[in-house]
Amino acid sequence: MVGLTPRVDYLADFCRPLGGLAAGRPRVLCHGVEIFLSTARKQVYVYDQERRLLTAVYTFPGQVWHLEVLSLRRAIYVLCAGRGIYCLSLDQPRRSPSQHDEDDEGSEPPFPVIPVDPDACVLPDATLCAFTVLDTMLVTLAQGPAHWKVQLFRCPYPGQDPRPRGQIGEVDLSSCTPLARSPGEPKAPLFPPVLYCVSPPGPGVPHGHLHGTRGFTLEGSLFGLLFGADATLMESPVLLVGLPSGQLCCIVLKTLGTSGLATSDPKGTVKVLHHLEEPVIFIGALRTEPLAEDMEDTYSDCLVALGHHGRTLAIKARRDEAGSLEPVLREYCLPGPVLCAACDGDGRVYHSTPSGLCVVDLARAGAPWGPVQPSTGPGGLPSLPCPASLRVHSVLALFVSPGVPEGGTKLLALSAKGRLMTCSLDLSSETSRPAAETAASAGRKVKELLGAIGTISERVSSLKKAVDQRNRALTRLNEAMNVSCTLLSSQKGRRPVSCTTSATWSRLGLRDVLTATCLLENRSAFGLGPGWALCVQVLPSSHASDLASAGSAVTYTLPVGQLGPGGRWEMTLPLGPGEDGVLDLPVTVSYMLFYSLREVVGGALAPSGSFRDPSLDRGASDIAPEQEGVCLPLGEHTVDLLQALRFPGLATPCTPGPGPLGPARDPVDTFLAAQCRPGSEPAGLTSLRAKHLPPSAAAIRVSAELLRAALGDRHSGATLCCAALQWLLADNAAADVVRACALASVQGVAPDGADVHLTAREVAVADLCPAGPIAAVEIQVESPSLASTCGVHHAVVRRVQRMVSEQAAQGPSPPDLRVQYLHQIQASHETLLREVQTLCDQRSTEDEASPCATAGRLLRVYEQLRSPSLPLL
């Protein structure tokens, strides 16, 4: 069979299938002199071989996925994507071009274009992926949410009620991967399932007349071995299903029909014959043994199945030495990937790959492997088939034409460019030609060829692996460069890749923990894939300016994995309190994207299969990330006490407010407890605080004009005080409740358990401007805990400072002020600062007789300094 060259005859040109070789499911089949063709679009073409012209074009409402012709009923069945199955009569009168008016000549095509009537849809179902017909039965395969579903209907055909006459039964197959169904035209699966009906030999049944184009008849011995005695005794057709997962399943249809509409336990109905471990592309049957003299009907004695990558299964039945039947199963590896395949009646399998059309002969007579492989005995299969190229490239659909004289084969083929052609082969001379070489010389040549092929294959595989690694590394580096350029070119405004933070309280074990929820958003046109990691550094602000305490920062490195354009990735990190029960706020959270060059390029630079010294990797963990990758800062966020406040009084009735953290103690309580000498008056810390330390307070004033300009229309409909409080608590978990209640004063709980009262009120500042009082909003913080007062006040001041810096460039000029009044305020504050210094010196030199009075006076001076009378303009 080496050197076979078919005679190719091009019949017609059609449109190229949409998307090329990988998209759609082109089909071609023959009925008499008519060829039915689908190019994976919405049309089914009818071509007359004798007259060599296109006779009709049927236009369907969606993409055509599959079609079959039932010759006995003279009907064609078409599966339309997202619509269902349509049934058309082959005897239906078609519109002739001669019937057009003379005025319309030139505007009409030379063949009738027939839109398919919606009433021709005999089985509407958007989930159908495949079907086959067998005289009175219509078998469909639908894709459910988690399983393939086989359904059996009474087959409708033209001349009767076009609708199905009832469902006979159904059964679920193995699990499948659900397809993401987008609105619009459904997309064809990359590897659609295949269905074939197999029938046992029966008296009085003309061979192949009751089947569609995907059906065949097996001889009785092979049929009984494959499907069991029940199918043989019932003379039941069997459905063969080839799944994209590689499973080859069989279902006895009469068993399915008598088991009810739904089979909850498919184990007794569905049988897995084999697993190809790759998507099943084709199932067929052929004849490998010569017919006996007393045999009239030609039944197939071998079942074959082809996978996408070329793995082929062949099953036959033979008798052993004792005369008992046993199955013979062989697996071959043919060239792939397989685009389509077909079988003829003389033991040959034709399969198409992107590089060419090949033929494999599984029959014993005239097999080219005879001189090399010993005979496997009667009923055996060759152990090493030799595919022969037919020198026809890129065939997408195949069909073996019937009625060809013995010794020849005629193939109908559709090429990737949309060409319909016939390939005629004369194999009689090949099968009858004697071998030109002896067995010894042929064996020696085959051995030499196999050795050379093995050496070249190993070298090609090694080089291909190295090239693939370098190509993948270059692709990833190109993506990293695109992301880096996008980030570096957008320093101002909204960045294409950003990370935001929100702080919330959560319960961890027996204590409450403040957590930071980080949200990474990719709004760029490029994806973040392998090699990218997000580095998050958490640094308490008390250590931010201390270079010696850099070790107190905690850094989390989280691999991004795969984050495409428009993707969002959320992670949660703990902020505290620590083991000592202290929550150190504010905390600065910094973000940085890190791209590891070692991970991406390391494998491509190392020679394939080379030895790597393990000692070279010992110091890899000591290398700083910036020395082996690319770092791109994304920004930072500060979590302060305003975000950590909790408001039990604002919680909904069904959600009780969290209690205070137990382990932490108030620093003021600790300070006062340390000042109490043994023998002093019997007063506890509560009475001492009430006597010497009233609730500490701090305030800041902001002019109403500046506040309105900064808030804008974001808080329309609320008073200025309510809007100011909402702006301060915008990052707090209770922001929505504060906004809904329109509050100007809230009572919260600090992380150390102390109450914090936050109030915003309108005041008028007099004696500052000659034009009159200045309207302002005073934001006051009050708490029994000095640490909580200072922390919340610092958070308020930080927000106001940022607001002032943003409005300074665009706001109006400040009004005229009284310089003398400003001098008086400055002198008053200088006096307070000198008093603080005096009290500090006095506290270090005085005895322990009266420390509380000095401490109380010092705290009151600090409170006066934190409550200035000047507003921010």
Image (cartoon, rainbow, N blue to C red):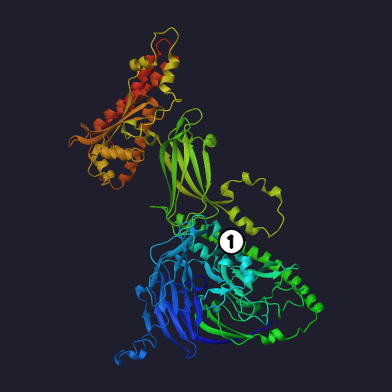
Image: 645 above or below 808: above
Q: Where is residue 542 in the image (x, y as percent from the top left)?
A: 46, 33
Q: Where is residue 512 in the image (x, y as percent from the top left)?
A: 44, 32
Amino acid on which the number 1 mark rests in the picture: Val
Q: Quadrant of residue 866?
A: top left
Count every numbered label the image shows and give the total.
1
Q: Where is residue 351 in the image (x, y as percent from the top left)?
A: 60, 75
Q: Nearer the viewer, residue 123 or 193?
A: 123
Image: 723 above or below 495: above
Query: Quick one: SS at disc 1?
Result: strand
Residue plotted at (53% across, 79% down): 415
Residue 243 is at least partly visible in this image: no
* The N terminus lies in quadrant: bottom right
Q: Where is residue 783 in the image (x, y as percent from the top left)?
A: 34, 26
* The C terminus lies in quadrant: top left
Q: Hey, which residue is sitting farthest bottom in the picture?
A: 102
Q: Which of 64 and 671 is in front in this view?
A: 64
Judge left or right: residue 557 versus residue 2: left
Q: Nearer the viewer, residue 7 or 175?
A: 175
Residue plotted at (43% across, 81% down): 90
Residue plotted at (47% across, 91% down): 51
Judge left or right: residue 14 versus residue 119: right
Image: 468 above or below 562: below
Judge left or right: residue 492 versus residue 594: left
Judge left or right: residue 243 versus residue 833: right
Residue 504 is at least partly visible in this image: yes
Residue at which label 1 appears: 272
How packed mark 1 is, by other alpha carbons closer than 10 Å (few <14, some 14-19, many 20 or more), is: some
Q: In which quarter of the image is residue 88?
A: bottom left
